[in-house]
């Protein structure tokens, strides 16, 4: 009996062209919409504000070289109020304040002085992954710029793993799930309709 009902329901679905259109077309439309909405568009660009309180040649070189790092876009600010406003408006992810005497202190560090320079970074805490990426970039870049060497060498080797992309893997899950979403209520409705008719 179940096999006969299933067979009849499948025949009714395939006789109705609108149902077939929705059954096949909607999963494709959903996949395309979600791919456009959530698909990666390449490298992420991090907009970062810089407040240079030192205005020295060394701080200018530091900022210029930081801006040359791939994925970072530097926006200069004269004061913290404007940077904070843009941070709250979402125009930048973070801003960094380069303190006064940065250039002088960096020269002392280059001459083997044990000074510490405080770079203050304020960031949007709703995007912790991107902020930690920026902080990591600034940390490693600043260590390199200040010519400080850490007695550690990390030997990393990237491995290119490629996956074969084909249409079956792309479309099949969406079609199956959407088909079940349509088929189960439709079959239930038809069974109920048959029971009411007798």
Image (cartoon, grey):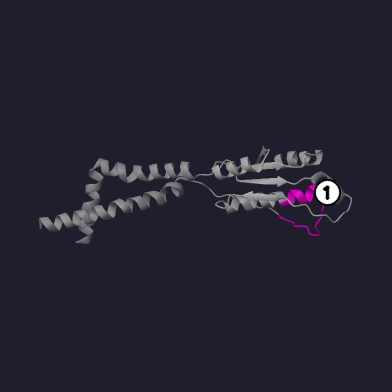
All told, the count of numbered labels is: 1
Magenta extent: 139-156
At x 40% / y 49%, what residue is drawn?
174
Mark 1 burial class by Cα count in 10 Å: few <14, some 14-19, many 20+: some
What residue is pinned by disc 1?
A: 105
**Camera-side residue: 19 or 117?**
117
Do we see residue 160 in this rendering? no
**Camera-side residue: 81 or 63?**
81
Among the 4 quarters of the image, the one containing residue 188: bottom left
How far across and how far down the image is residue 151, in percent? 81, 59
At x 50% / y 44%, what residue is drawn?
39
- Residue at the far bottom in the pictured view: 1
Tell whether 73 sits left or right of 188. Answer: right
How far across and how far down the image is residue 175, in percent? 37, 49
Q: Is mark 1 on a helix, strand or loop?
A: helix
- Residue at the far right in the pictured view: 111
Tell whether 96 sits left or right of 185. Answer: right
At x 10% / y 55%, what residue is drawn?
197
């Amino acid at each position: 009996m179940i096999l006969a009902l299933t067979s009849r329901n499948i025949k009714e679905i395939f006789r109705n062209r609108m149902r077939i259109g929705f059954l096949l077309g909607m999963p494709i439309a959903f996949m395309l919409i979600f791919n456009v909405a959530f698909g990666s568009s390449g490298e992420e660009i991090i907009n970062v504000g810089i407040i240079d309180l030192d205005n020295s040649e060394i701080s200018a070189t530091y900022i210029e070289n930081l801006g040359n790092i791939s994925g970072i876009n530097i926006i200069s600010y004269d004061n913290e109020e404007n940077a904070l406003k843009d941070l709250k408006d979402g125009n930048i992810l973070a801003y960094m304040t380069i303190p006064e005497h940065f250039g002088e202190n960096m020269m002392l560090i280059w001459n083997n002085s044990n000074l510490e320079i405080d770079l203050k970074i304020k960031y949007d805490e709703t995007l912790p992954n991107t902020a930690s990426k920026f902080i990591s970039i600034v940390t490693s870049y600043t260590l390199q710029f200040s010519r400080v060497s850490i007695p550690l060498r990390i030997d990393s080797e990237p491995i290119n793993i490629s996956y074969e992309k084909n249409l079956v893997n792309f479309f099949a899950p969406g079609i199956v799930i959407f088909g079940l979403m349509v088929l189960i209520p439709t079959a239930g409705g038809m069974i109920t309709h048959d029971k009411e008719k007798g």
